[in-house]
């Protein structure tokens, strides 16, 4: 008997945050040095407040968290942002007047997110720079209804590559794969079963109460773990490892280099393995 297929669940608005650190920090220092210190040293606090949402608002999942800063001046703040789950992009001064590459890097990353597979629904740009006005206008050209369309996953399961993982806690597994690894919930029948997708990969997450969790004729109970794994291609494995370690993700090993590229193994909350791989030459 197959697992039931109720309507899929959406665990919060899919959001992206882009922070022009130098601009915000210097602006706050001129107005309120104490606020500037809190902004620079405790990004986790105010980011979690935005994620929780206000009264009557949906919660948010910040699938993209980027911070752009000048490492020559502000490198001491980098660990605070890394520990808060941000990808920190170094933008040193490129001219005698101190102009950095923050603007162009932020805009390019934001436009990539707008057109990307993560299906971002809300964008947060933290800056007082009027140069970003055109970017905000571009965001507004896309209606909320367009943002809220579900990712286009083929209805025919034969067009997907399906892999089943046994998990101890379906809700925890769904949260892990959607928060950290860019998967989207296709459907959920938690606590028994859920499936999530990333591109054409469909990951079936089966808990102890699912049909896949029933004992074998000899009494053996399917459990999580082992060494077979899904394989996710990344562009910068060192940056991904830094980002994930900062959020508390567990790794089985360190980065291994070989002729074909670099790889590392991480574990989901149930102990199943996921491989991150960066091909040689990238």
Image (spheres, helix red, strand yellow):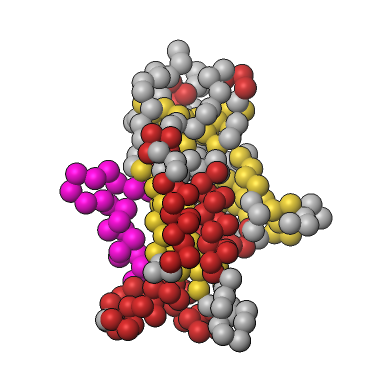
- Answer with the quarter of the image where residue 206 lies: top left
Q: Nearer the viewer, residue 188 or 52?
A: 52
What is the span of residues highlighted in magenta in the rendered image? 42-61
- Answer with the quarter of the image where residue 29 lies: bottom left
Q: Position of residue 185 (x, y in %)?
A: 44, 34
- Answer with the quarter of the image where residue 154 lies: top right
Q: Is residue 279 left or right of residue 46?
A: right
| Residue at x 50% of width, y 18% of height | 217
Q: Is residue 49 visible?
A: yes
Q: Is residue 188 left or right of residue 226?
A: left
Q: Nearer the viewer, residue 154 or 83?
A: 154
In the image, is residue 55 part of the stretch drawn in magenta?
yes
Whether 84 is drawn above or below 153: the answer is below
| Residue at x 34% of width, y 61% of height | 47
Q: Position of residue 2 (x, y in %)?
A: 46, 16
| Residue at x 73% of width, y 56% of height | 282
Where's the N terminus, which quadrant?
Answer: top left
In the rendered image, the residue lying farthest to the right is 259
């Amino acid at each position: 008997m197959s697992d039931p297929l109720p309507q899929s669940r959406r665990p919060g608005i899919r959001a992206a945050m882009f922070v022009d650190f130098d601009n915000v920090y210097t602006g706050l220092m001129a107005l309120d040095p104490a606020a500037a210190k809190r902004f620079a040293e405790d990004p986790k606090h105010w980011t979690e407040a935005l994620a929780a949402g206000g009264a009557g608002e949906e919660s948010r999942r910040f699938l993209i968290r980027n911070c752009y800063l000048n490492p020559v001046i502000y490198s001491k703040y980098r660990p605070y942002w890394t520990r808060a789950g941000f990808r920190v992009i170094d933008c040193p001064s490129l001219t005698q007047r101190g102009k950095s590459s923050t603007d162009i890097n932020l805009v390019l990353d934001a436009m990539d997110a707008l057109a990307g597979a993560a299906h971002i629904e809300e964008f947060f740009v933290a800056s007082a720079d009027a140069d970003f006005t055109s970017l905000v206008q571009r965001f507004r050209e896309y209606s909320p209804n367009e943002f809220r369309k579900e990712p286009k996953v083929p209805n025919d399961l034969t067009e997907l590559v399906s892999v089943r993982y046994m998990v101890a806690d379906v809700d925890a597994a769904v949260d892990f794969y959607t928060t950290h690894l860019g998967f989207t919930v296709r459907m959920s029948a938690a606590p028994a079963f859920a499936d999530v997708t990333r591109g054409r990969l469909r990951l079936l997450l089966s808990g102890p109460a699912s049909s896949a969790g029933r004992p074998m004729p000899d009494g053996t109970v399917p459990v999580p773990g082992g060494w077979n794994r899904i394989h996710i291609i990344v562009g910068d494995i060192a940056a991904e490892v830094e980002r994930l370690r900062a959020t508390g993700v567990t790794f089985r090993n360190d980065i291994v280099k070989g002729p074909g590229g670099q790889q590392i193994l991480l574990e989901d909350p149930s102990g199943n393995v996921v491989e991150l791989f960066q091909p040689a030459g990238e």
